[in-house]
Image: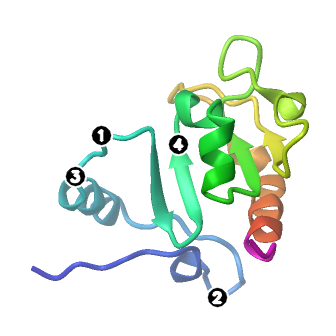
Amino acid sequence: MHHRRFSLTDQVGEKGRYETPPTSDLYRLLWINPGSSSHMDEVRPGIYIGDLYAAKDKPMLQALNISHVLNAADGKYNVNTGASYYRGTNIEYLGVEAFDMSNFDISPFFNSAAKFIKTAMSTPG
């Protein structure tokens, strides 16, 4: 079976804008890649996706040399860590108050999140 990895650069169109991959590619990724049993997974070298427990485990984040945390569930009723939670560490923080609802428009946060991720990827460590 042929497996293909997708990256952001795969999804940049002729005008330099991100293009959403076809639904069939997204479904294939879901079926091919099994789910995780941990609170955090490395999805690219040095890039992790985690849940509430991972976000609040400062010793683990520091042990893995995590330099940036992008919280896409920021806010009082979600994963309410905020930048102050990481005070005393070398972790930079960006919070996005997004809601896990099919009609929530997350696109206004794309530019700031992409800039934050780009900065994180260019940070040694």
- How crowded pointer 3 is (Cα within 10 Å; few <14, some 14-19, many 20+) is rated as few
Residue assigned mark 4:
50
Q: Which of marks 3 and 2 is nearer the N terminus?
A: 2
Q: What is the quadrant of the N terminus in the image?
A: bottom left
**Which residue is disc 1 drawn over?**
37
**Separation of disc 3 and disc 2 at Cα?**
33 Å
Q: What residue type is labelled 3?
A: Pro
Q: Name the residue under label 3.
A: 34
Compared to residue 35, the image places residue 114 above or below, namely below
| Disc 1 crowd, CA 10 A, few/some/many (<14, 14-19, 20+) | few
Q: Position of residue 91 (x, y in %)?
A: 81, 49
Residue annotated with mark 2:
14
* Residue 105 in view in this figure: no
User: CB of mark 4 within 8 Å of CB of mark 2?
Assistant: no
The disc label shown at residue 8, or none: none
Amino acid on which disc 4 is placed: Gly
Which SS class for mark 2? Answer: loop
Q: Looking at the image, is mark 4 or mark 2 earlier in the sequence? A: 2
What distance separates the C-alpha of mark 4 from that of mark 3?
Answer: 16 Å
Q: Is residue 104 left or right of residue 45?
A: right
Looking at the image, the residue that sits furthest to the top is 77
In screen coordinates, is 22 left or right of 62? Answer: left
Q: Is residue 93 magenta?
A: no
Which of these two is toward me, 53 or 17? 53
Relative to 112, residue 40 above or below: above
* Front label number (3 vs 1): 1
